[in-house]
Image: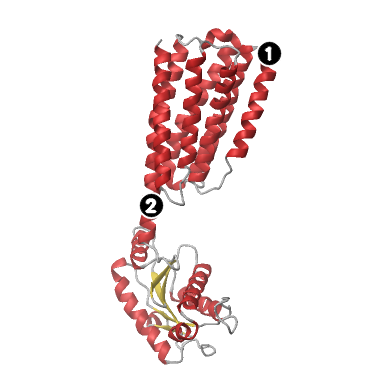
């Protein structure tokens, strides 16, 4: 009676949370993060337990076959939902239908050849294997694609490990004791369904928590990035710089201001759509030429900032020249420009090294002064602040010149 009551409460719990997941998915326009799939998983598992209660004692009947198929399909659906949550597109209906038909056929074969107890043991064994695979995937995810959710992944792995262990024990118990092991009044069945109820109670709010955290992280990322180029904005730049200098081993940083030459002429000649394409092209080049860990930012308009971390004046100069040359030597492909591909150039100003995020404004002013010297000297060149030259007398003091801007 105790286990039966627990299963009944579990049915209500699963179906109610399934409805809640479905409602949440309708509010997540475009990117549902797998919530609609989690809802389907809850509906499948809740329906399986309803059939178990309606079907009576363990035996061979159509209701029992459907119950077993739904019970096995539910965790597979949860796996698809998890993949979609992490942005990995995964088909649902065709694989699910294939699994359902294959397992239904396997049940018929097991029943005819080995009997009813073997069919129940097969469900426990197949479930144990499925949960073992899920546990291994979650552990792998905590080290790779879900490193930002490592604590949550470890918790999920522990919870899944519990249901894996219970199904493995049920598999062995059914093989040894037959259908008697499935008596709803037995201690094992009570423990099994108590854990299932606990699991459903913990996992459902945890999924909602993960969705809220992911939405919060995305909002934070949007607040720290330029919407057009997806580079950092000034706020994101300062946060990244503060994170860098919090490290005890943080080295000095140099700031580069990158300004597109004659950008107003591009806008006036081709329109703002082409101008936006040029901005995105320059942003892509900055991403490609910057070293791993460097901070790239769009200040606004046609001005960009790159902060070279853990480097000296010579390293900043090499990065600036690599960036300038890459932009000069690549074409901006756009159908909106009737004259064919567009070429653009940039002028870059470099600040002296600094070792504190509070010095960001001063470094920007120094790099900006160097930038305007480069603009006045003919554009498409690199200028260092005089302080940087004095700090590194071995470097060239003349600006790097190139062909005139197009």
Q: Are marks 1 and 2 in contact (CB under 8 Å)?
A: no
Residue 386 visible in rendering: no
Q: How many callouts does the rendering have?
A: 2
Toward the viewer: 190 or 69?
A: 69
Kindly give the residue lying farthest to the left in the view shown: 358
Disc 2 crowd, CA 10 A, few/some/many (<14, 14-19, 20+):
few
Q: How far from the left and from the top, in percent, is residue 10?
A: 41, 23
Query: How far apart are the alpha carbons under marks 1 and 2?
Result: 52 Å
Residue 114 image label:
1
Q: How far from the left and from the top, in percent, is residue 37?
A: 49, 39
322 versus 94 height, above or below = below
Q: Quarter of the image containing the N terminus?
A: top left
Left or right placement of residue 403 versus residue 244 in this view: right
Left or right placement of residue 207 versus residue 144 in this view: left
Residue 25 visible in rendering: yes
For image coordinates 53% across by 76% down, the residue present is 322
Mark 2 lies on a secondary structure that is helix
Figure quadrant of residue 392 = bottom left
The residue carrying mark 2 is 217
Toward the viewer: 242 or 21?
A: 21
282 versus 197 height, above or below = below
Q: How far from the left and from the top, in percent, is residue 138?
A: 51, 38
11 versus 229 height, above or below = above
For image coordinates 43% across by 51% down, the residue present is 29
Toward the viewer: 387 or 74?
A: 74
Q: Colour scheme of this structure image? A: secondary structure
Toward the viewer: 62 or 34?
A: 62
Observer-side mark, 1 or 2, equals 1
């Amino acid at each position: 009676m105790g286990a039966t009551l627990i299963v009944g409460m579990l049915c209500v719990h699963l179906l109610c949370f399934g409805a809640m997941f479905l409602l949440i998915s309708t509010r997540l326009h475009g990117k549902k993060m797998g919530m609609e799939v989690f809802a389907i998983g809850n509906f499948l598992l809740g329906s399986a337990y309803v059939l178990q209660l309606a079907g009576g004692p363990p035996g061979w009947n159509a209701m029992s076959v459907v119950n077993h198929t739904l019970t096995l399909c539910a965790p597979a659906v949860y796996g698809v939902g998890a993949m979609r949550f992490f942005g990995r597109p995964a088909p649902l209906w065709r694989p699910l239908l294939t699994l359902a038909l294959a397992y239904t056929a396997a049940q018929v074969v097991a029943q005819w050849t080995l009997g009813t107890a073997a069919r129940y043991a097969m469900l426990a064994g197949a479930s144990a294997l499925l949960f073992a695979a899920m546990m291994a995937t979650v552990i792998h995810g905590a080290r790779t694609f879900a490193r930002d959710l490592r604590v949550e992944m470890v918790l999920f792995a522990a919870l899944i490990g519990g249901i894996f262990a219970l199904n493995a024990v049920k598999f062995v118990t059914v093989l040894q004791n037959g259908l008697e092991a499935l008596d709803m009044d037995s201690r094992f069945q009570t423990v099994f369904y108590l854990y299932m109820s606990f699991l459903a109670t913990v996992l459902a709010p945890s999924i909602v928590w993960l969705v809220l955290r992911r939405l919060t992280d995305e909002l934070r990322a949007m607040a720290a990035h330029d919407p057009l180029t997806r580079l950092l904005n000034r706020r994101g730049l300062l946060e990244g710089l503060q994170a860098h200098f919090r490290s005890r081993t943080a080295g000095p940083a140099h700031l580069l201001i990158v300004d597109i030459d004659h950008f107003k002429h591009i806008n006036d000649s081709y329109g703002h759509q082409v101008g936006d394409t040029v901005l995105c092209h320059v942003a892509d080049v900055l991403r490609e030429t910057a070293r791993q860990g460097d901070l790239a930012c769009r200040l606004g308009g046609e001005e960009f900032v790159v902060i070279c971390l853990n480097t000296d004046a010579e390293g900043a100069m090499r990065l600036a020249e690599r960036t300038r040359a890459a932009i000069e030597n690549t074409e901006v492909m756009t159908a909106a420009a009737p004259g064919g591909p567009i070429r653009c150039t940039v002028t870059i100003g470099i600040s002296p090294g600094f070792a504190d995020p509070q010095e960001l404004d001063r470094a920007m002013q120094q790099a900006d002064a160097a930038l305007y010297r480069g603009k006045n000297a003919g554009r498409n060149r690199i200028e260092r602040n005089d302080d940087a030259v004095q700090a590194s007398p071995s470097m060239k003091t003349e600006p790097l010149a190139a062909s005139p801007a197009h």
